[in-house]
Image: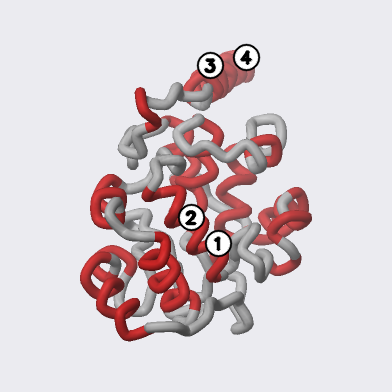
Amino acid sequence: MKLLLALVTLCLSSSLVGAAEPIAPEAGGSPIAGWNRAQAERTWVLGLKANIQRGESAFAICEGCHRAGALGRVDGSYPRLAGQHATVLIKQITDVRSGLRSNPKMLPFADQHALTPQEIADVAAYLEGLAVPPGQGTGSGRDLERASLLYRKDCESCHGPVGQGDAQAFYPRIAGQHFGYLLRASKMIRDGVRRNAHPQMVELIQNYSDDDLSLVSDLVSRMPSAPR
């Protein structure tokens, strides 16, 4: 019986490693390359029972970039992860591992040699439960009225009226995020660099100017840090 269980475990692990091999980008770098394509590893991780204490220990490998408390960097070079939906974190990590999302800086810290599927679940649960204090980086505060109009028209239906996101739909909580990161990420989505972006978002912001993206990013960065 022990031998049989070992063989089953080995086969399952091998299939998941295979599923996590990089996916070639579509011609032209299309950002619509399977926004929420079903992945064996993600499905597995979402079904695991997480342990927050283990997640705190496993997060040590991430702290150098995302900082203590997962508060990121005010300049936006690294995002805040504290308070983010665990489902969103799991999707993004497994998308990076599979090649669906391109993130060369993160990949060495998130690949199969660095994190096990159980550790992904543990880290995600730990991060979701962290407090998100005020003090995130914000923009200039210019023309927030226009920014509010744009947000209500194009962003609110998915990210919510106060940027709370939707855990079940894998829409991230964006309230309390650093302005610099919001602006950089939205440009990457608009320009097709972030290949796992939701196609509806790509369509909605494809005609946004850099200034439009800056205005909306500034507005979002001023939302309450951790709306629940």
| Callouts 2 and 4 close, C-beta under 8 Å | no
Residue type, label 2: Ala
| Callouts 3 and 1 close, C-beta under 8 Å | no
Distance in Å between CA atoms under marks 2 and 1: 6 Å
- Mark closest to the chain's N terminus, 3 or 2: 3
Residue type, label 1: Tyr
Within 10 angstroms of label 3, few (less than 14), some, or many (20 or more) residues? few
Q: Nearer the viewer, residue 188 or 211?
A: 211
Q: Position of residue 117 (x, y in %)?
A: 58, 38
| Callouts 2 and 1 close, C-beta under 8 Å | yes
Within 10 angstroms of label 1, few (less than 14), some, or many (20 or more) residues? many
Judge whether residue 70 can be spotted in this image: no
Q: Nearer the viewer, residue 97 or 135?
A: 135
Within 10 angstroms of label 2, few (less than 14), some, or many (20 or more) residues? some
Q: Which mark is residue 114?
A: none
Distance in Å between CA atoms under marks 4 and 1: 49 Å
Distance in Å between CA atoms under marks 2 and 4: 47 Å
Q: What residue is pinned by disc 2?
A: 185
Q: What residue is pinned by disc 1?
A: 181
- Mark closest to the chain's N terminus, 3 or 1: 3
**What residue appears at the point 48 percent right and 38 percent down from the top-left corner?**
101
Disc 2 element: helix
Q: What residue is pinned by disc 4?
A: 3
Q: What residue is pinned by disc 3?
A: 11
- Mark closest to the chain's N terminus, 4 or 3: 4
- Nearer the viewer's eye, disc 4 or disc 3? 3
**What residue appears at the point 36 percent right and 28 percent down from the top-left corner?**
28
In the displayed structure, 65 sits above or below 107; it is below
Distance in Å between CA atoms under marks 3 and 1: 40 Å
In the displayed structure, 108 sits above or below 171; it is above
Disc 1 element: helix
